[in-house]
Amino acid sequence: MKQWFTRTYKIGKLSISFLSDEIIFIYRGRKNVSLRKVPRHWFSPRRQLLYATSFLFMLLCLVMFLPFGDRYDDKESLDDLQKEEILLSSETDFTTPEKSETLQIRYHKVQQGETLSEIAKQYGVSMDTVCGCNNLVSYDIIRVGAILRIPNKDGILHTMKKGQNLPSIAKKYRVSIKKIISENELANPDFISSGYDVFVPDAKPLNIIPGFLWPAANTYITSGYGWRRHPINRRRQFHHGIDIRSKYQWVRSTKYGKVTFTGWLGGYGRAVVIAHPGGWKSLYGHLSRIVVRRGQYVKQGQIVARSGNTGYSSGPHLHFELLKNGRHVNPYHHLNRR
């Protein structure tokens, strides 16, 4: 009996053809073709539900498990393709290092309305470099008309003083002597005359202002140094520091130094202690968060913590102390209030 097509459906590599008296399933694989014929009378009304369910299950299995072409449907295969693309790219080929750029000093006259960040960005160096090469006392204030010396790479121009040598400069800025020599044309590295400008690569200013920087943005003191009645127990006691109004604000290092303690300090709550050259130490108490670690060196003005209300405290503030050679001093007399 002659057959004729009624309709054909295609799902990926699978074709389903409905003939007059049979149904043909054809799957075209990567290496061979599979064909299966099913008599149409098998799909009697009584069996349609069962066969339809079986057909849908088989179709789902084909979609999920059979390799339809050369596609990469799993994440690992896609990752491998991406990896190979990166590894074979010319952008990941080996190239010899470029020769270090020769040091050049440029001069910039500060115009009205210019900021330090804008000037640094214009010349492609950091604010630390501009600040350190020109002995600026603030990152925020620069005098209009001032002539700034700006190198073409990050570092500090250090003017040699009497009695100074390269080892002392290298130790001060924690930069290797070889690195300093390679950046400067020195006739005799062992003998450098005072007044000579030595470029110290990658160095940063240790202190941006003379003396001690206010550790908080606010300068309002809620409790001073000396005898007082404790705000909680009302007992008369000596207050060895000052309390600065600071409600969960960032706290900065008052001077260049080394972090020698971080953690819980009794009634002071979370605290940080920084040791400074010359026998000085500073303490920051009642902190809500500490962002430095013990043994870390910090420059003046670097963020070390956030003020808070931990420990024996009546409210969020910063407790700040200064010690000289193991003895407390009044911080107010040493803090730069500009």
Image (tube, rainbow, N blue to C red):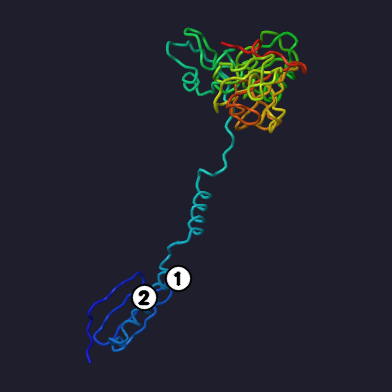
Determine crowd level at label 1: few under 14, some 14-19, many 20+ residues with C-alpha closer than 10 A: few
Task: Determine the residue located farthest toward the right in the rendered image.
Answer: 326
Residue highlighted by disc 1: 65
Q: Secondary structure at mark 1?
A: helix
Q: Residue at x 44, y 62 (%)?
A: 73
Discs 1/2, front: 2
Tell me where residue 53 appears, x and y as whole percent.
Answer: 36, 78
The quadrant the N terminus occupies is: bottom left
Which amino acid does the dot numbered 1 rest on? Phe
Tell me where residue 108 appears, x and y as whole percent.
Answer: 49, 13
Q: Is residue 245 above or below residue 146?
A: below
Determine crowd level at label 2: few under 14, some 14-19, many 20+ residues with C-alpha closer than 10 A: few
Q: Is residue 210 visible?
A: yes
Judge left or right: residue 95 versus residue 122.
Answer: right
Residue highlighted by disc 2: 56
Q: Is residue 158 visible?
A: no
Q: Give me the C-alpha separation between circle 1 and circle 2.
A: 14 Å
> In which quadrant of the rendered view does residue 11 lie?
bottom left
Depth order, front residue of 212/123:
212
Which amino acid does the dot numbered 2 rest on? Leu
Earlier residue among tags 1 and 2: 2
Tell me where residue 254 appears, x and y as whole percent.
Answer: 63, 19
Task: Determine the residue located farthest toward the front in the rendered image.
Answer: 234
Depth order, front residue of 296/150:
296
Tell me where residue 161 appears, x and y as whole percent.
Answer: 70, 9
